[in-house]
């Protein structure tokens, strides 16, 4: 199988050799598409031959609700195992699927430029959220999205939703009136046309890191001058790392997982200040807490990352001081 770009895709193991960079990915259409984009840029920047190696993860094969699969990181561990076992040299994840804690032997080597972090409603007949009929059936597997939907429309019937993006979209107009999905995922696989409304981040901050990718490498490769370090530097985007780090630091300080009813939105304004808003929801949408803070970003890349990290922790502490852990039962979402 060859992606349209000419990058080779293998479902079989590929042996390591000089001049070859093996990029591990999940096998979904979304994962292969986004990893192909990264692989093309790495091929262009390094002159190396780049091959995609598809790693099957438990999250891809199971139909159980995400919460029953162990929540955080179900999509991630198989790719990390492959990286540590030397079956690939880089692994590409959706950043929001990556647990906030460090992983022994693995570095978050690059965060490429982030795309639209918003959530999208994909409804039948072009309907917006306000236009959905009383009691409409809406699908989402995310407690945060469920809470945000119910906060605006307590009459809705929210249903759990699993499977890849096309499977979820396929239920619209069948047993569901609408589903909520990330704009980024929809647009990456050419399904932007199914979107009937994009929710403003002011009202509906999304999962920490949504819309960003994470490229992981073995720590040693990332720290040693060579083809892998060059590849990582070629796709790194500093501002995207800062905003994603601030959002992830918020999530980590809350000691919450990717299935937590937590929304975050970081942006960098014209004056070079990083602004972070964090929201925590009661899962039935009946209550929420929102806190915002900002910090001037220094020039130095390491100092920038530290500033972003500290901002995330500060906003999380403000949320915790206001009772976020009790409100959202955060301990249960790890
Ligand atoms: N939870 C699954 C998941 N992980 C990454 C994306 C795509 C969006 C992104 O890359 O942030 C999705 C689908 C969705 O939330 O609609």
Image: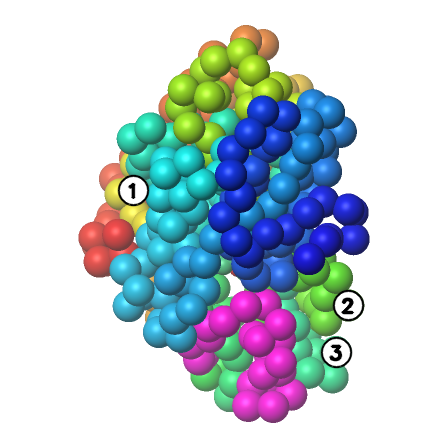
Position above or below: 81 against 260: above
Instruction: Provide the secondary structure element on which disc 2 rests.
Output: helix
Q: Disc 3 marks which residue? A: 126
Q: Please state if 197 lies on the left or on the right of 148 as rendered.
A: right
Crowding near the residue tagged with mark 2, few <14, some 14–19, many ≥20 C-alpha atoms within 10 Å: few
> Which of pointers 2 and 1 lies earlier in the amino acid sequence?
2
> Which of pointers 3 and 1 lies earlier in the amino acid sequence?
3
Q: Are marks 3 and 1 in contact (CB under 8 Å)?
A: no
Q: Disc 1 marks which residue? A: 254
Front residue (pair 93, 27): 27
Task: Give coordinates of residue 144: x percent, y percent.
Answer: 42, 60
**Secondary structure mainly formed by the magenta segment:** loop
Disc 2 versus disc 3: distance between alpha carbons? 10 Å
Position above or below: 31 against 314: below
Residue at (60, 90) in percent of width and height: 174
Residue at (42, 36) in percent of width and height: 86
Crowding near the residue tagged with mark 3, few <14, some 14–19, many ≥20 C-alpha atoms within 10 Å: some
Instruction: Provide the secondary structure element on which disc 1 rests.
Output: loop
Task: Give coordinates of residue 239: x percent, y percent.
Answer: 61, 26
Q: Disc 2 marks which residue? A: 193
> Which of pointers 2 and 3 lies earlier in the amino acid sequence?
3
Task: Give coordinates of residue 176: x percent, y percent.
Answer: 56, 85
Crowding near the residue tagged with mark 1, few <14, some 14–19, many ≥20 C-alpha atoms within 10 Å: many
Disc 2 versus disc 1: distance between alpha carbons? 36 Å
Look at the image and give the residue range highlighted in magenta.
158-178
């Amino acid at each position: 199988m060859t992606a349209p770009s000419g990058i080779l895709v293998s479902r079989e193991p590929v042996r390591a050799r000089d001049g070859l960079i093996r990029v591990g990915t999940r096998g979904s259409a979304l994962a292969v598409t986004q990893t192909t984009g990264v692989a093309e840029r790495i091929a262009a920047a390094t002159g190396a031959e780049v091959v995609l190696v598809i790693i099957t993860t438990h999250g891809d094969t199971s139909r159980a609700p995400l919460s029953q699969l162990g929540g955080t990181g179900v999509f991630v561990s198989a790719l990390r195992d492959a990286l540590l076992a030397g079956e690939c040299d880089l692994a590409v994840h959706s950043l929001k699927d990556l647990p906030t804690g460090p992983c022994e032997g693995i570095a978050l080597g690059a965060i490429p430029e982030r795309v639209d972090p918003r959530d999208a409603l994909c409804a039948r007949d072009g309907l917006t959220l306000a236009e959905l009929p009383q009691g409409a059936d809406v699908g989402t597997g995310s407690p945060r999205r469920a809470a945000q939907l119910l906060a605006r429309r307590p009459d809705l019937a929210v249903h759990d939703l699993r499977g890849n993006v096309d499977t979820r979209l396929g239920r619209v107009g069948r047993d569901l009136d609408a589903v909520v999905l990330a704009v980024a995922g929809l647009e990456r696989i050419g399904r932007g046309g199914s979107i009937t409304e994009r929710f403003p981040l002011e009202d509906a901050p999304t999962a920490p890191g949504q819309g960003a990718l994470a490229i992981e490498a073995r720590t040693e490769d990332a720290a040693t001058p060579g083809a892998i370090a060059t590849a990582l530097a070629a796709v790194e985007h500093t501002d995207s790392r800062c905003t994603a780090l601030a959002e992830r630091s918020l999530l980590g300080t809350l000691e919450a997982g990717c299935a937590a009813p937590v929304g975050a939105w970081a942006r960098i304004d014209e004056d070079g200040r990083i602004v972070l808003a964090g929201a925590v929801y009661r899962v039935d949408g009946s209550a929420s807490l929102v806190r915002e803070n900002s910090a001037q970003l220094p020039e130095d890349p390491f100092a920038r990352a530290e500033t972003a990290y500290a901002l995330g922790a500060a906003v999380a502490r403000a949320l915790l001081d206001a009772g976020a852990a009790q409100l959202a039962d955060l301990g249960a979402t790890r």
